[in-house]
Amino acid sequence: MSRGGAKAAQTESRGEVDGPGDPGGHLPAHGAQRLPVWQSSRPGSLYDYIRVASFSLGPDGRIEQWSERAADMLGIPARHAVGQDPIEAFVPPELHEGGRRKVSEILDGREWTGLVPYRRSQGGDADGLAEIYLMPSRNAAGERAAVCLVVDVRAMRGIETDLAASQAVFGQSPMGFTLFSTDLKLLRVNERFATVFGGPAGKYRGLTPHDFLPRPEAERMTAALRRVLETGEPVAEMQFVGAVPGEEERRRWSVSLYRLHGASGRPIGVAALAADVTGRRRAEREAANARRNLALLNEAGSRIGNSLDLETTARTLLDVAVPQFCDLASVDLYQGLLAGDETPPGMSDGSAELRRVAFSSAVSDAPLATAGRRTPEDGSPDGPVAVGAVHRYPFNSPCAAALRTGQAQIVPGRESDDGPELGAVVHSTLAVPMVARDTVVGLVQFSRTKGSEPFGERDTALAVELAARAAVCIDNARLYRREHERALILQRSLLPPGDPEAAGLDIACRYLPGTTATEVGGDWFDVIELPGHRTALVVGDVMGRGLRAAVAMGELRTAVRTLALLDLEPAEVLSALDEIARGLGGTGDGRTSARAPRSRSGAAAGMPEHGALTPAADLSEVYLATCVYAVYDPITRRCTFANAGHLPPVLVEDGEDALLLDVPPGMPLGVGGEPFEEIEVELPDGALLALYTDGLVESRHHPLDEGLQAFRRALSDAGRPLEDVCDHVLSALDTSHGEDDIALLMARVHGLPKDAVGDWSLAPEARSVARARELARDQLTDWGLQDLVDTTELLVSELVTNALRHGHGEIRVRLLLDRTLVCEVWDADLAQPRRRRARDTDEGGRGLQLVGLLSTGWGSRRTPRGKTVWFELPLPDGDSAPADPTEALLSLF
């Protein structure tokens, strides 16, 4: 048969004998049973790779048949080979003798296999090597013949090399290498796979993924194998988790699948490469955790401590930790430390009271239930701790141990049958003490719920670092709160009450510190009640700000109040205050430091504003101050002003523009050497008087003149309520620059009505005593103060009698009715009355004692032409009766 006919027959044979599988020899459907049928193979089968050829020898030892494969492989066409002696045709001459001997033996019935060199053309050298298998046969006549199979040795050696390489890769691979058949059963596994799962490699033949993987993972593996087998698309890096015999830790494998094909291209199975990535996965997780921890620390460093508010700092810590680090968290701080105690009782053993200052949860809004907690009242167990609640931990609890030792404690989770308690789902808690400056200030608890990984060593180290950072910031906030509260107490104690009262004046005031960090400064204002229903209005400004300026301000304010109660003239008050300020700014060795005149900015003339200052010079800076002092008399409606380097007061009369009063400025307090001047201004009813500090009208954004103009414009509508005027001024001017303190004192004048004043002049004679009593009785009756008649008559009689006895000249008596009743008696003598204790045998000397017993206050002051003695009585309120003069008189004996 010719070669073309053979190929046609082969093609026809393939078309006729294809079995029940896929057309063209494809894999049959999965699960179908393969039937033992004839089936053709595609080109490219194993025989093509081995390159097998055949020919036959006749009884005479010559070639009878020569296959086309032999012609292709050996390069000799059939017409040149048939009838030839193979020894002569193919074997080199030096091997002819041995070759003929072998052919004779074969023809005698002996098989032979061996390597034979051959040449591809006549007369050429040997250029090939073939492995020949000679098999004895007989022809139709029964004569001896031979059938020869020829294999190209080079092709055979290549196949052997490929098989050896495949075997080496399969057997020596550090990865698990498996082959699955088309029915998804294991055909072969390598030693690495067998080492992981135990036993010899042969025992896995015929097994399925369900035999060595958990059921869910096995189903995933089976589905992937089937998909690769059907589609031919490989799958890379599939992750599977399973347990290895003898190990508790679950392992993770990365599996890659690809379909295998035979020489004819027919799918013959699926190969799987599996690598154990448990360590890599663990390393990736640890690297991810490390990155997360670094990110948390970076976020904590940028966010925690930005506020000096204690609760805000605690909440910021929890915002950083939840949910990035844990599912729930809480912060407890020692109640005693929050109250200002440095070492509260029980702090050393962890049993002191704590207050929950912050709580955060990513899983529930309910507070965290803590095992072993006790209420501070009776020590009984209690439920979850609410924010702001006070509680304590018993001595043997992990939380108390953390507070006691300063070491983080891991609190295991607990199961609860009492109901849906949050503590039942918490399976891991870290109790971390908050340590700042070697002092435990509180406890932070980080908790993770079921489903999250429990805390490990790295987590514990991170929690300790977070708690340590927050502890320092919280302790700073605690210290700031303590100092801030002390500073506020100091500042408030140095300022008048929020609603000061004065006769003939409506008062409104505002104080704004230059910095909210301390809320204390050197500006001050004061409203001082003086005898005769007069009022002293004071506004001052110590140069500088902060706590030292506040201390200096307090000393000066106290000095002002003391000097004011001496009832000195305004200029005299400032002169005495200047001497006091110079003494306060001394160098500490008893000598006052010399000062040059200073500008409004506080710098000495001829000296640089910036530079090194000695401690004494720095102290003298603190006690330089400006001050304006005004005394208002509601009866005469006149106000006397004196100024020590301060900005001038502003007066607004009804229907008029605001006016800066021309008060001589004088020198700042503490400079010394210059007298102070004073002026007297009549203030009509309804007029508005404003005293202020330079922080209200001066800043780096605009000059002083512009600030004063804006201030005057803001006061143009002064007819509204006084409190509204204050708010309008502060909103109209730039009071948020934070450069200097601001003090604003406003007073609206209305004076005392004429019918609230009784004023009489008496002759210096004995009958004036009775006349004074009569006038006082009639005036009190007109005012409806009959309850005060007896007491007032007695005290007026005593003061007029003293004026007659110890004074000289005309006597003047005045009664003033406002919030209290004031009686004043003038005489022309400068000698001040002195209170003394009379003996039992003395007939007199008890008048001023009686005045002191029956009045709420009394005193005397000098006047330009003598002195004034006064006393004050409270008005009846209907709840308490006035003092009985009879009992007072009897108490003196």
Image (spheres, rainbow, N blue to C red):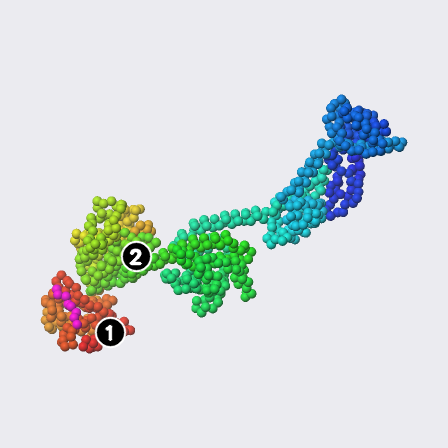
Residue lying at 23% horizontally and 69% vertically, measured from the top left: 856
Q: Quadrant of residue 38?
A: top right
In the rendered structure, find residue 274 and report the number of the disc placed on it.
none
SS under mark 1: loop
Q: Position of residue 368 (x, y in %)?
A: 49, 61
Instruction: Please say whether residue 419 is one of the residues in the magenta stretch.
Output: no
Instruction: Please say whether residue 831 is one of the residues in the magenta stretch.
Output: yes
Q: What kind of residue is marked 2?
A: Arg
Residue lying at 18% horizontally and 66% vertically, measured from the top left: 859
Answer with left or right where residue 705 lies relative to residue 203.
left
Q: Given the current orientation, which residue lies at the most extreme right position?
A: 141
Answer with left or right where residue 445 lies relative to residue 519.
right
Quadrant that contains the C terminus: bottom left
Q: Is residue 358 visible to us here?
A: no
Q: Nearer the viewer, residue 880 or 408?
A: 408
Give above or below for 298 relative to 746. Answer: above
Q: Which residue is mark 2?
A: 510
Residue lying at 14% horizontally and 64% vertically, measured from the top left: 867
Bounds of the magenta segment: 830-837
Quadrant that contains the N terminus: top right
Characterize the local packing of mark 2: few (<14), some (14-19) or many (20 or more) Cα atoms within 10 angstroms: some
Answer with left or right where residue 760 lies relative to residue 310.
left
Q: Position of residue 19 (x, y in %)?
A: 78, 42
Give above or below for 465 relative to 813. Answer: above
Give above or below for 298 relative to 885. Answer: above
Q: What kind of residue is marked 1?
A: Pro
Q: Which residue is mark 1?
A: 882
Q: Nearer the viewer, residue 593 or 399?
A: 399
